[in-house]
Amino acid sequence: MDSAQKTIGREAECSGIGMFRGESTSLHFKPSPLNSGISFVRVDLPNRPGVRAHVHSLSSNYKRIFLKNEEAEVESVEHLMAALAGLGIDNIEIEINGREVPAGDGSAKLFLEVLKKAGIVELGGKKKGFIVKTPIMVSSGDASVMAVPCEKGLIFSYTLDFNGSFIERQTYDIEITEENFCRDIAPARTFGLSTYIEEFKKLGLGKGVTDDNSIIVHEDGKMTKPISMKPAKLRFPDEFVRHKILDLVGDLYLANVVIQGRIVANRSGHSLNVQLAEKIASVA
């Protein structure tokens, strides 16, 4: 809770295709000074408008996170935000020449590798922390996510359950440290249910989906690559629940605080995750 704020040691870059729109974009990471926070800069637009990575900038959470100011929008930021959270980076400027963050391999690995190579440096001032003293909960139907007190650290407990369809119930518990995050959470890839395919086609989404950046889960439990429909090989037996924690880590980092507490989630997605982030930011 009392560790120093951090940024990167030097500028760095990466590029790729956005999963939803299929457009090529690049990211240019730049060190930022103490208390400057995390921000995106749309360098492809006139006047290079900035978008703050904070719950106050949320504009939508349909299948991914959208951030917006009056002039610009950035989407699919959750895996990058998770990487920043896992590495403890709280001050950085991210120039982006399009609206969607590149998908990489559907996990946070691309961003971790680039940011680690840039080096992580301390800035001196203390991080802003939030100790959960009383439970904070949001829910919708049988889905919920809550923050409850914990003596130390940040622990995630997630239950993934599709009521007997698609995959068997998965649960995962982890204390988030840089080592644990990088090894056990960051490599977990995006997955989608086969029932979403037609919906995405109608909406013109999923144009950047490849066999290398996502997995399709079918109602009979089969797991395939999305384009070739060949059997998909998992990185972890419980990769899907780990990916839900990856999303949750990134979504909660939009509260711009380091949380001390236990996050208990049951079937939650981006919508509930950011609602919890908003509640935390309002009292932190």
Image: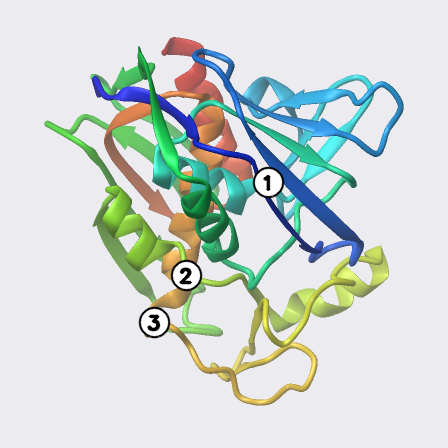
Picture layout, residue 88 above or below residue 268: above
Q: What residue appears at the point 45 percent right and 82 percent down from the top-left corner? A: 233
Q: Are marks 3 and 1 in contact (CB under 8 Å)?
A: no
Q: Secondary structure at mark 1?
A: loop
Residue denoted by label 1: 77
Residue reaching furthest to the left: 151
Q: Nearer the viewer, mark 3 or mark 2?
A: 2
Q: Quadrant of the N terminus?
A: top left
Using the image as rendered, state which of residue 137 and residue 60 is in the foreground. Answer: 60
How are the residues colored? rainbow
The numbered disc on residue 236 is 3
155 horizontally vs 25: left or right: left
Picture layout, residue 72 above or below residue 87: above
Q: Secondary structure at mark 2?
A: loop
Using the image as rendered, state which of residue 151 and residue 11 is in the foreground. Answer: 11
Q: Secondary structure at mark 3?
A: loop
Q: Amino acid at mark 2?
A: Pro
Distance of label 3 from label 2 (alpha carbons): 9 Å
Q: Are marks 3 and 2 in contact (CB under 8 Å)?
A: yes
The numbered disc on residue 187 is 2
